[in-house]
Image: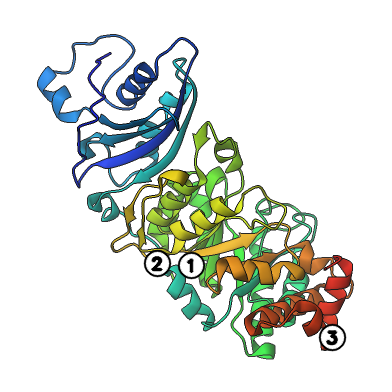
Amino acid sequence: MREDYIDTEYEPGPDELVCEYYIEPTDGVSFEKACNHMAGESSIDTWSDISTLSPERAQELKPHVFSIDKERGTVKVAYKQDLFEIDSVPQILSAIAGNIMSMKLVKNLRLEDIAFPEDVLNSFRGPKFGLDGVRDLFRVYDRPLVGTIVKPKVGLSSEQHAGVAYKSFVGGCDVVKDDENLTNQKFNAFDKRAQLTLDAEVKAEKETGERKMYLCNITAPTCEEMLRRAEVINDLGGKYVMIDIITAGWSALQTLREATEDMDLAIHAHRCMHSVMTRNPRHGVNMGTLAKLTRLIGHDQLHIGTVVGKMHGDVNEVLSLKDECVLNHVPENDEFNILEQEWSNIKPMMPVASGGLEPGMIPDLYDMFGKDVIMQFGAGIHAHPMGTEAGATACRQSVDAALKGVPLDEYAGNHKELKSALDKWSYK
């Protein structure tokens, strides 16, 4: 193993890919040795000296550990662009978050962030619709969008599923989506569910005069079947597909984005299973990195957490994820291990807040996210004492109260659906 990867005088060039890591050496291993091996193992080196690569070529390609902060346990590494297949997220991750995560020399290693140079950005399409395009689809520009997940996650027939979707739409939901583990079960086959629920969407649009969108989960065993399901939605006149981004895999996500360039479909990214990589603050991959990769590939909206709901994620993490979704320029923030990113031609994504929400939480969500968010409710709609339709109505009433700056208990005085929701969930 070379011993010259650390160079704190080095200044990365504009065409280099920069990564920030948190690193804990194994007991008895120096911080510098761990950093050196991590840089080498992620690029041109291995555990013992080799002679197959010329010294000249090695000097051209070697990465540079240019920043070390032992107190915080963080390092920054600049990688030459030639080390990567720059339009391949799987290859990039195989390098910067691959075998290095298993090295015995480190007790813990976490990829905190990646800063992409312009050549990499230009190799990807980014979102087809993005935040502004999503608003254009709904023709709603002045409030958060309200959505629901059909509950229970699995167990309903296709007819029952469509019936719940219809009640949600007419009650006030803009969005109805499948849950992450509903795909093509015997009791609720994909093609039948798609047809019936899109029919319910059309019926609700005619009755309410509002645009409604059904987000059907096209996650599948193969990329071929995933694309077939996307084509089914497109042929039926649907405007959206949903994909489980971690379980489907990065190649599938890039394949889907390429296919939707010729379809009129927006992509909803569900992040189930992300916590396997992201929840440990000392090892794995930061969720912010996964959000950046999702935006780079080109999905239009992404689950980022709620702070106030049932899912893990504190306010700083969730708001940082929001910034990664919506900002054109993300400033560097050492406190939260965020690298500066200029997104250039890559459109913003629409953030999605989802997980354990109910109508009484909407003012807090609005204070945190503003209007550029999709607020998604599961049991917070379907467990409403007056039923699904009233649950959706209560959410829209709560949004109206937040926009007007009226306290919920006051607004509930002449809105019975909201009052019932507040009474059930012990609003104070």
User: Looking at this view, is 322 or 101 the one in front?
Assistant: 322
Q: Residue at x 52, y 31 (%)?
A: 283
- Residue 195 shows in this picture: no
Within 10 angstroms of label 3, few (less than 14), some, or many (20 or more) residues?
few
List x then y, in percent, for residue 171.
75, 80
Q: Is residue 205 above or below residue 153?
A: below
Q: Is residue 188 above or below residue 70?
A: below
Q: Outermost residue toward the front? A: 71
Q: Tell me how far mark 3 sits from mark 1, CA to CA.
A: 39 Å
- Residue 310 shows in this picture: yes
User: Looking at this view, is 73 or 131 the one in front?
Assistant: 73
Q: Residue at x 68, y 89 (%)?
A: 208
Q: Please state which amino acid type lies under the numbered disc 2.
A: Lys
Picture quadrant of residue 170: bottom right
SS under mark 1: strand
Picture quadrant of residue 6: top left
List x then y, in percent, for residue 258.
38, 57
Q: Residue at x 81, y 73 (%)?
A: 388
Q: Which residue is mark 1?
A: 266
Q: Which residue is mark 3?
A: 413
User: Looking at this view, is 183 or 45 the one in front?
Assistant: 45
Which mark identifies residue 128?
2
List x then y, in percent, for residue 35.
36, 23
Q: Please state which amino acid type lies under the numbered disc 1.
A: Ala
Q: Tell me how far mark 1 sits from mark 2, CA to CA.
A: 7 Å
Q: Residue at x 79, y 58 (%)?
A: 152
| N-terminal-most mark, 1 or 2 | 2
List x then y, in percent, for residue 154.
76, 54
